[in-house]
Amino acid sequence: MTKWVYTFGDGKADGRADMKNLLGGKGANLAEMSHLGLPVPPGFTITTEVCTYYYDHGKTYPDTLTGDVRAAVADVGAKVGAIFGDKDNPLLVSVRSGARASMPGMMDTVLNLGLNDETVAGLARQAGDERFAYDSYRRFIQMYSDVVLDVGHHHFEEILEIHKEEKGYTLDTELTTADLKALIVEYKAKVAAELGQPFPVDVNEQLWGAIGAVFGSWRNARAETYRRLNDIPESWGTAVNVQAMVFGNMGETSATGVAFTRNPSTGTAEIYGEYLINAQGEDVVAGIRTPQYLSKAARVAAGDTKPSMEESLPEVFTQLVEVFHTLERHYRDMQDIEFTVQRGKLWMLQTRSGKRTAKAALKIAVELAGEGLIDRETAILRVDPQMLDQLLHPTLDPKAPREILTRGLPASPGAASGIISFTADDTEKLAASGRKVILVRAETSPEDIHGMHAAQGILTSRGGMTSHAAVVARGMGRPCVSGAGALKIDANAQTMTVMGKVLKRGDVITIDGATGEVMLGEVPTVQPELSGDFSTLMGWADSVRRLKVRTNAETPLDAETARRFGAEGIGLCRTEHMFFEADRILAVREMILSAEKAGREAALAKLLPVQRGDFVKLFEIMAGLPVTIRLLDPPLHEFLPHTEAELAEVAAAAGVPVSVIKTRAHDLAEANPMLGHRGCRLGITYPEIYEMQARAIFEAAIEVGEKAGSTVTPEIMIPLVATKAELDILKDRIAIVAKAVAAEKGKDIPYLIGTMIELPRAALRGGEIAETAEFFSFGTNDLTQTTFGISRDDAAHFLDDYLRAGIFQKDPFVSIDEDGVGELVRIAAERGRKTREKLKLGICGEHGGDPASIAFCEKVGLDYVSCSPYRVPIARLAAAQAALHK
């Protein structure tokens, strides 16, 4: 029979750390900590297979699960000496989610489950602390009502705030037992008013309600968004962990906290974390109270006066440090730990590999290798290539003037400027319109995930370094400043008040997640310095990767940036992008709109010297590295004049009436320009265009070669080829130009002629086309469009629906569709190399910077990938990981 429930605690467990697929990350690690002999409250895990069953069978459970859970609850009670639902000696449990991939804050949790009017009295007698018992009951009603009964927590927050205001209280800890009892009556009345039925008192009903809520939360909106952003399949499901409660809210010798075995922002090997005396875990991660530092050193460095855990609970702190060392050495990675101290006894509630910034990931990987805990290959595999994006963009210019409004906690490094927005929905809307936005909140919640993703940075007035805002921002690579307590945020009025200034929605601020500073206006930035751990790890990566990494670039700035990031040449120079500048666009329009060859040649004569100058700069920057130049491939509508002024300007330059230009523009208009008169079709119709570009390339190659005393070998790429005949005709034309330039300059010109494979027919006829082509570069943007029959520009209208429905697992324009588009790439590669054994193969679409697509390129045996300059380091690391996995 299928085993649906696995127990843990008391130094033993049914599961192990390598059972994450079945037990989820939390359940597997609770089992592993139990085996390690660490103090873990006993409990049990309901497997991810139950989640799958739940959704496959109309939200019902396997027949034997009820009995399995009943037995497991009894086992937990026996281990702690309590009975679930007993009015004198009640067992209380927590019910938490636990997917195999960490999804902090995305799914639901219920604490203190098992309380009602009878068991709360028993808990009070058992603990000898009536206030603690009723505080736990008050928390349970609020959390259970929100998570299970769908009575929003704001109802209870409002009741609580009104009560505190009436009593003159500032902190929740000032509430007396009488206050808590009164609040419980009000809370239950609110539930009855909202639902039309009372709050459930049967503890088994409570338990199954919570279990159902956790499974249900696997498909809530914020979890779906998080999975989509982090490529987590819905089919994985979540486990449910039911665990005996331990209490951090039992007075001044009790506490709760979150800790990392190393600093998750910088990677430094130091005690990093926060705790709260007399609190429960949700108080820390939700940012309801600003927590205190674990170590004295961290407290002193921050200038905080509240005692650290090292000072207030020194014996427990010493135990915690020992646990840090045990877990890090066992898992051989930085750990993110949740713990509770109940009346001086330490309990471990969770451990997992901690989310970290890119800077920290590099430092931790390099240092763990240096410490001998992992080898270099493991270090390479430990760093998510996508995270490197955090390091590659500008940071604040240290010399730039700045008006500091306030300081908070440096929760996630990086700097960002943008307009203020106070809601996640508004942030998403503003970002979609092209605005840079800073999301400003008192504290974020999991419902804000979409706004946090859309924002440039996040600023909160409450919460610590391990609050929801901080953890999620670090995982996303967004700068974050949390706990900026001087901010007074009025979300309804859309204002933020600080230092006597009132800022409103739309005002510009800058945040620095490395220092915690919040500044007025936009502060200039500087380019990053890529050395130290980055340089070390990238050196290790370069030593094991097989795939070369080139860049897509047509401007000197892009080419120089890419070289600085380690590009090994240019894999795609889109020459049409060179023509959009104001001093060139007129000549291009004149060329396109000319009905006669003589008119086109006159316009091309104006473009020849600027094209030659462009290529000279690129060849010089690449200094002998390969440069692949794609000849003109614009959908013509991109260049056609649209306004009356533009039409008049072209007419004047061409010396013809405006009416002639209008007629010609009308003749050239296309119903579907992306599939129209573009690419090699332009070269067939107007060969003089490609002849001009070929001349510019060859003349530039000779000029640069003579200056450098070396030979430049350009790679000329013919776009949008569907047949060998097209390529034959255009290759012959280019060869004629090469001979002419060689004769004029008295110097032979080596060059390669290849094509961009971006049509299914070209892929299928790869063997035939390779008779002429010396290289293939797969243009997977257009190959995806033509394979699916989907316009990349228009797909946004329905792509999300396809992703939600599971038709697409990933956006095919972001990560290559291996089954369809990938199969065409594989066919073209195999057939092409059968014809020409040394055929050079590369990819130059957006997929060239996507790690999953790079892994596919390694499997297929391509020679290189080409991507945008800022993705070059990502591609270098991803190529290394692909080689190691292979």
Image (cartoon, rainbow, N blue to C red):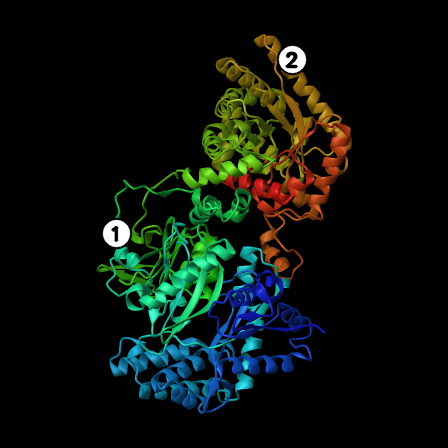
Return the residue nearer the eye: 512 or 675: 512
> What amino acid is found at the position of numbered circle 2 in the picture?
Lys
Residue under the image location 75 percent in, 36 percent down: 830
Pick the front one: 604 or 175 = 175
- 491 sits left or right of 541 in the view: left
**Res 208 seen here:** no
Circle nearer the N terminus (1, 2)? 1
Percent across and percent down for residue 576 are: 56, 32
Q: Position of residue 879 (x, y in %)?
A: 58, 40
Measured Cα–Cα span from mark 1 to mark 2 = 64 Å
Q: Is residue 111 above or below residue 790?
A: below
Image quadrant for the N terminus? bottom right
Residue drawn 68% across and 71% down?
A: 56
Disc sitting over residue 739 in the figure: 2
Residue on which disc 1 sits:
404
Q: How many marks?
A: 2
Q: Residue furthest left?
A: 500
Badge 2 local density, few (<14 within 10 Å), some, or many (20+)? some
Q: Quadrant of residue 205?
A: bottom right
Q: Amino acid type of disc 1?
A: Ile
